[in-house]
Amino acid sequence: QVQLVESGGGLVQAGGSLRLSCVASGRTSSMNYLGWFRQAPGKEREFVADISRSGIIINYADSVKGRFTISRDNGKNTVTLQMNSLKFEDTAVYFCAARALSVGNYDFWGQGTQVTVSS
């Protein structure tokens, strides 16, 4: 099992920045990809970004490309999402996730952290 705990959410004005962090514990050796997802009120959870164990392969949703940056520190078992130029539509609960394989569904999820962007 892997436990994931997110932090860094909050209230920010449009155009501002936030930095989300996620710390993993447990069987962290089983973590291959780490990712961020989000769920806005009344909407389904959607992919934001993910990163491979090596950090070489990084994927972003089109809606956040050029504004968000994902990174990871394997020594500290953390994954970070730097969010710049935030928009009202970025408002959501953001979830950290981990998966053991390079493809497929994510196996482990955090509880989420709220990000609210005021217009």
Image (spheres, rainbow, N blue to C red):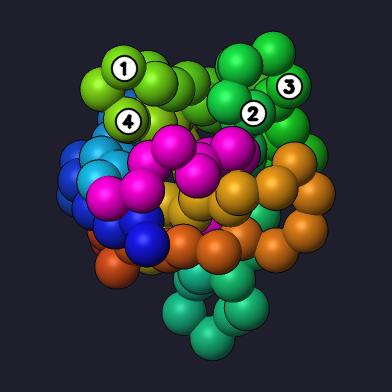
Residue 45, image x, y percentages: 59, 71
- Foreground: disc 4 or disc 1: 1
Q: Which mark is residue 75?
A: 1
Q: Rounded to the nearest whole Å, what is the CA distance between mark 2 and mark 4?
A: 13 Å
Q: Which amino acid does label 1 sit on?
A: Gly
**Along the polypeptide, which appears first: circle 2 or circle 1?**
2
Q: Which residue lies furthest to the bottom in this view?
A: 42
Disc 2 is placed on an element classified as loop
Q: How crowded is mark 3: few (under 14 residues within 10 Å), some or many (20 or more)?
A: few
Contact (Cβ within 8 Å) of mark 2 with mark 3: yes
Q: Rounded to the nearest whole Å, what is the CA distance between mark 3 and mark 4?
A: 16 Å
Disc 3 is placed on an element classified as loop
Pointer 2 residue: 52
Tell me what residue is drawn at x 58 percent, y 52 percent.
99
Pointer 4 residue: 78
Q: Rounded to the nearest whole Å, what is the CA distance between mark 3 and mark 1?
A: 18 Å
86 on left or right of 50: left
Q: What residue type is labelled 2?
A: Ser
Contact (Cβ within 8 Å) of mark 3 with mark 4: no
Disc 1 is placed on an element classified as loop
